[in-house]
Image (spheres, grey):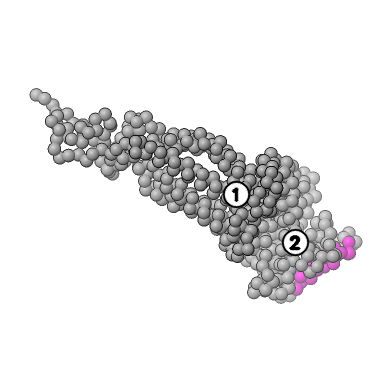
Amino acid sequence: MWEAEKTDSSAGPEGPAEPVLQHCDMTTARNGRCGLRSFWAAAAVMTAFVLSAAGGSAHASKADELIREADKAAVRALEAKRKTDRDESFKKAIELYGKVGSDKMYLGTPQGAEALYRIAKLQRDIAARQGKKQEHGSLYASYETLKRLINIYDKPVSALEENLTRTEAREVRRIVGSALKLKEEVAGRLDRLNSTDWKYKVIDTLVALTGRVTGFSYWFAIILITIIVKLLLTPLTKAQFKAMKEMQKVAPLIKEIQEQYKGDQKAIGEKTMALYKEHKINPFASCLPLLVQMPILMLLYYTIRSYEFQFAKGTFLWIGSSLSHLASFPVMFNPGSLVWVTARNLAEPDLILVVLYVISMYISTKLSAVDPTQAEQQKMMAVVMPVMFAFIFAGFPSAFLLYWLVFNILQTAQQYMILNSGQAEAVVSAPAAPSPQEAPDGGSAADETQAGITTPKPRRRKTRR
């Protein structure tokens, strides 16, 4: 099977002996088609299989069988001449490996680690046979698979031995050692591909201008580019918040309509739209500037992600300090991902940044609640949205979280200043409470006060005889 690589005979017991990379079966080895080194590597793997079977592990035998079937499909994928054949065999191999690597039954076992490692290696090898765009996707998939493997299995031998034999624990450690080296190689290839992109070059120029200082250049480049983009978006932001401020003006009148026609949603809707029309307010005016900003924000996101592997060299305040990697938590909805309470570098997830972002988003959402007709929904969204984004962003690199946090703080500050500027003059007063005494013409005193403004209650007229 795979014969592309040879084992390094100088590697130590924890080094990349990697018999799994040879993939030569015993018959092929005896016929001299593989080197002596590959023969002993294949023999070691087969010996491990025999020992596992002798131990009475039916699950391990099933896992070994699935891995062997996946190996055959992997060879067909790498040797296929036609793209359709290659894609079909590749998909089959990934599916078979995944039955072991993603199955809870094999979680924490050498077979589970081995399956994930082979998935990552196949994704890396298949990338060399694809176009540039597909190559990047396959390499990134390989990188993510290796991250998952390392997050799950990178533990001391003593911790592994709680559930495994000493031989199995050492085998897991050997696989982790190989995975760490493969991850470094894949990250290097991805970084070289990214370095041709103009977005990468923009950040790299900013980092270079400040001397590539580990504790300064990288986070400073993130904050600087975020501020520049925010300044460019200021006209759109002002238009968005100006529309929100117009909504604030009529908020007291809308509240009066809600109280007057409580329970009649149709009447509330009609009266509210009539009020908007009278005051020349478009309730959807704040949406357009926001939609225009979205592509720009996404571009900034991809700019940060393109430099992800270089951010592994950067630190920020507590990130990279002596407090790094004190504790970690699994990321919900993303098995195998971890978020560190304090990350080691800007390429790793950081829980403190996630918490700070959630707080900033909660404040921003509360300030945005200007429509009384949706008060309850807005209160709920002020809580639900930050929590939802916390789960989404928990596994993201801290470089991205730092950018999003700074952008959100700037946005919130700008929002507060615009919405509260000249507030005393801007807000329309709520109608006075109706007096029980009627005005001379038969209307109420409240009707007199609201002359010139559409009121929730139609004015009655006396018919003269």
Q: What residue did someone put label 1 on?
A: 400
Q: Position of residue 403 (x, y in %)?
A: 58, 47
Q: In which quadrant of the rendered view does residue 451 lie?
A: top left
Tell me if residue 44 is in the magenta stretch. Answer: yes
* View extreme (left): residue: 465
Residue 160 visible here: yes
| Image quadrant where one finds the N terminus | bottom right
Q: Residues within 10 Å of mark 1 (few under 14, many from 20)?
A: many
Q: Residue furthest right?
A: 32
At a point 58% along the width and 39% down the height, the residue shown is 228
| Among the 4 quarters of the image, the one containing residue 13 | bottom right
Q: Main secondary structure of the magenta part?
A: helix
Counting from the top left corner in percent of width and height, residue 233 is at 54, 36
Q: Which mark is residue 178?
A: 2
161, 70: nearer the viewer? 161
- Residue ID at (74%, 42%): 131
User: Is 299 left or right of 115, judged from the image as shown?
Assistant: left
Answer with left or right where residue 335 lies relative to residue 255: right
The part of the chain drawn in magenta is 35-53
Q: Nearer the viewer, residue 158 or 75?
A: 158
Residue 58 seen in this snapshot? no
Vertical placement of residue 349 versus 223, above or below: below
**Cα–Cα span, label 2 and label 1:** 28 Å
Where on the picture, by quarter, is residue 342?
bottom right
